Amino acid sequence: MNIEGILRGGKFKRLLEKTMVDAKSKADLNRLELEVIYLLFHYDDITTLTDICRYTQMNKGHISTTLDNLQKKGYVICERDENDRRYVKYRLTEASEQIRMEVDELWSELLTNIVSGIDEHSLEVFNQVAKQINDNIDRLLENE
């Protein structure tokens, strides 16, 4: 768990929406589509519909529609898992490269601005605490 995971609340989503306005209109994509492109690019362990749902905390129907739209626009392809054909993995195409670069730059700038004025040690402590909280929540959910 890192700072991005903690900031998935409403305020952060509004700020992200505001930050992505130009990229959204330029690429004709919505915020969630841009976010899915970012996730698929940056996280090797996020490849399936379930992975994306877990990270974004959005329902499968919404993410499925988003992935379908990205696929129709040529930014994402889906492939059956070689070990288990029931699973579909998503990956980005070369056509998404320009969007990936723009979103990556915007995201990096946004995170830099969010942590402005916070020293490196404090951020490290924050990340450690956030990871422990996330691990605790996972453990509690497993016991349901």
Image (cartoon, rainbow, N blue to C red):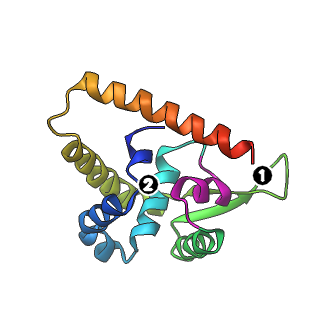
Looking at the image, which is closer to me, 61 or 97?
Answer: 61
Looking at the image, which is closer to me, 109 or 119?
Answer: 119
In this picture, which residue range is highlighted in magenta?
A: 46-58
Give coordinates of residue 21: x percent, y percent.
26, 71
Give coordinates of residue 58: x percent, y percent.
56, 65
* Type of amino acid under label 2: Tyr
Give coordinates of residue 111: x percent, y percent.
27, 46
Give coordinates of residue 49: x percent, y percent.
65, 60
Q: Is residue 10 magenta?
A: no
Mark 1 neighbour density, 10 Å: few (under 14) some (14–19) many (20 or more) = few
* Type of amino acid under label 1: Asp
Q: Residue at x 25, y 25 (%)?
A: 120
Mark 2 neighbour density, 10 Å: few (under 14) some (14–19) many (20 or more) = some
Q: Residue at x 27, y 26 (%)?
A: 122
Looking at the image, which is closer to me, 18 or 14?
Answer: 14
109 vs 49, left or right, is left
Q: Which residue is mark 2?
A: 38
Predominant secondary structure, magenta span: helix
Label 2: element kind: helix
Q: Which residue is mark 1?
A: 81
- Disc with the residue nearer the chain's start (2 vs 1): 2
The extreme left residue here reads 117
Q: Residue at x 45, y 67 (%)?
A: 32
71 vs 23, left or right, is right
Q: Is residue 139 above or below residue 57?
A: above
Label 1: element kind: loop
Q: Residue at x 63, y 41 (%)?
A: 138
Q: Which mark is residue 47?
A: none
Q: Is residue 137 above or below residue 129?
A: below
Looking at the image, which is closer to me, 141 or 131?
Answer: 141
25 vs 50, left or right, is left
Q: Is residue 49 magenta?
A: yes
